[in-house]
Amino acid sequence: MPKIQRTLPAECLECGNPRPLMGHCTHCGSTDLPQALTDTVVINLEAGGPTAEEALERLTQHVRAASEAGIRALIVIHGYGSSGSGGKIKWVVRDALENNYFSDRVDEYYFGEDLAFGSNGYHAVIKRRSSLKPHLSQFKIGNAGMTVLLMH
Ligand SMILES: [Zn+2]
């Protein structure tokens, strides 16, 4: 399983405490846009067992929030596209990307299976966003359960 980032990726501009990118600050309740503390965020679309439609909506919200907070890369965990309702998430995400659903905020995207450590895809991504290196170097044979989005 890919390692999921547990630290809060942003800082509240009202009170200065760490907070999630989405929603509100749990310290002061501020709903203002937070300041990003990292340039790479991992989003697990499978968490909580959403439908494919719910997962796509979650991704849409995260792409918007990440873009506005200055996050430069998103690692989207969507599973392997196996059978069952959860298996559809991967195909909904990739279909949306291929239809330029996020093209106003997402510059380029790379499928996890093309990002095996040391591959051409891996080197292309690391060249553009070196912060992805610790996230991707663990995947010796690529990971079809994720897609990497490089933000504008
Ligand atoms: Zn706050």
Image (cartoon, helix red, strand yellow):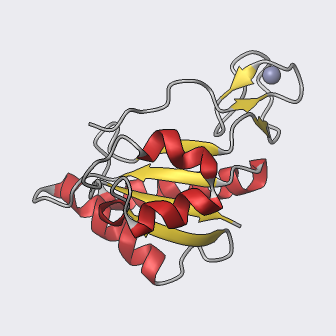
**Residue 42, how many percent across, how many down?**
50, 42
Please say if 100 is above or below 89.
below
Q: Quadrant of the C terminus?
A: bottom right
Q: Residue furthest right?
A: 14
**Residue 95, how many percent across, how many down?**
37, 77
135 or 46: which is nearer to us? 135
Task: State the residue at coordinates (50%, 56%).
Answer: 59
Q: How many marks?
A: 0
62 or 146: which is nearer to us? 146
**Residue 12, how many percent across, how many down?**
81, 28
Task: State the residue at coordinates (76%, 47%).
Answer: 69
Q: Quadrant of the N terminus?
A: top left
Is 108 on the left or on the right of 54, as rendered? right
Quadrant of res 128: bottom right
Query: In the rendered image, is residue 60 in sight?
Result: no
Task: State the residue at coordinates (52%, 45%).
Answer: 133
Quadrant of res 39: top right
Is 78 on the left or on the right of 62, as rendered? left
**Residue 92, how many percent across, how many down?**
34, 69
Quadrant of res 144: bottom left
Query: In the rendered image, is residue 19 in sight?
Result: yes
Task: State the residue at coordinates (22%, 52%).
Answer: 86
Please say if 77 is above or below 123.
above
